[in-house]
Image: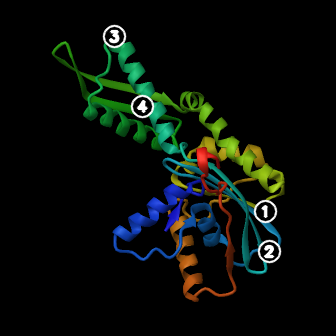
Amino acid sequence: ITVPAYFNETARQATKEAGQIAGLEVVRIVNEPTAAALAYGFGRTDGELVMVLDLGGGTFDVTILEFASGVYEVKSTSGDTWLGGDDWTAQIALNIKERFEKELGHPLSHRPEIRQRVLIAAEAAKLELTTKPEARINLPCLENVDKHLCSFQSILKKAEFEEMTGYLLERVQIPIKRALEDARLSIDGFAKIILVGGATRMPQVRELIKNLSGKEPYIDIDPDIVVGLGAAVQAGILTGEVKDTILVDVIPLSLGIETRGGIF
């Protein structure tokens, strides 16, 4: 089973127990960026450095690996377990709410069904902005204001979207810098920078990585399935079907025991 690299021991144990409850024998927990590197990794040049950036719906992971003589060695890993594509969606949803209230002069209801409709429209707009310069938002009969059903229509331009979510790109850079510092490396020394996770489809994310590294990010395998392919490779290693490949991973967080007084 794969998990975000920056999951702590409690989250990993909960994942393992969930697998056991489902009737599975959980043989190995694999970090998702590491699994992605395995999916890419056959036939690489010895000493080649690879950075894997995994931005999913709710988590962001950075892993630096080196390949040598059939061994995948993880040099460092970092991440943010509270950053993902959902944050970009939430920002659009907040924008929809603000526009609705400004146009109608009436607060948008906090009812769950209203919030859900706004989130669905926000997600659709985010996906549309991946390939188009603007997204049309249309929410018919969204809210009952003064006994009248009020609809909401608006156009969100890509420039507006990028401006309102710029602070999220700043958060993306923090784990990247931390992983580079831990590995004592600079970003221009990597042969490949691999993008994983559906949120890496956003042009602003790809542009950020290109600007930081000076090279085009690597997206040869569908970012939505590459982790699953890597998990299959790891299963092949464990069963002996995949030979001459060894994975050496690291833990992302310090481990220790709690002593008297809550001391680590």
The kind of residue tagged 1 is Ala
According to the image, label 4 marks what residue? 93
Residue visible at 41% across and 36% down in the picture: 122
Residues at circles 2 and 1 in contact by the CB criterion of under 8 Å = yes
Q: Please provide percent x and percent y for residue 204.
A: 62, 41
Nearest to the observer: residue 19 or residue 60: 19
The kind of residue tagged 3 is Gly
* 2 or 3: tag closer to the N-terminus: 2
- Separation of residues labelled 3 and 4 (CA atoms): 18 Å
The kind of residue tagged 2 is Thr
* 2 or 1: tag closer to the N-terminus: 2
Q: Is residue 194 above or below residue 146?
A: below
- Tell me the element at label 1: loop
- Tell me the element at label 3: loop
Give the crowd class for mark 1: few <14, some 14-19, many >=20 residues within 10 Å. Answer: some
* 2 or 4: tag closer to the N-terminus: 2
According to the image, label 3 marks what residue? 105
Give the crowd class for mark 3: few <14, some 14-19, many >=20 residues within 10 Å. Answer: few
Quadrant of residue 35 in the image? bottom right
Q: Is residue 1 above or below residue 51?
A: below
* 3 or 4: tag closer to the N-terminus: 4
Q: Please provide percent x and percent y for residue 182.
A: 78, 53
Residues at circles 1 and 4 in contact by the CB criterion of under 8 Å = no
According to the image, label 1 marks what residue? 191
Q: Is residue 105 above or below residue 119?
A: above
- Separation of residues labelled 2 and 3 (CA atoms): 62 Å
Residue visible at 54% across and 87% down in the picture: 239
Q: Please provide percent x and percent y for residue 216.
A: 72, 53
Quadrant of residue 161 in the image? top right
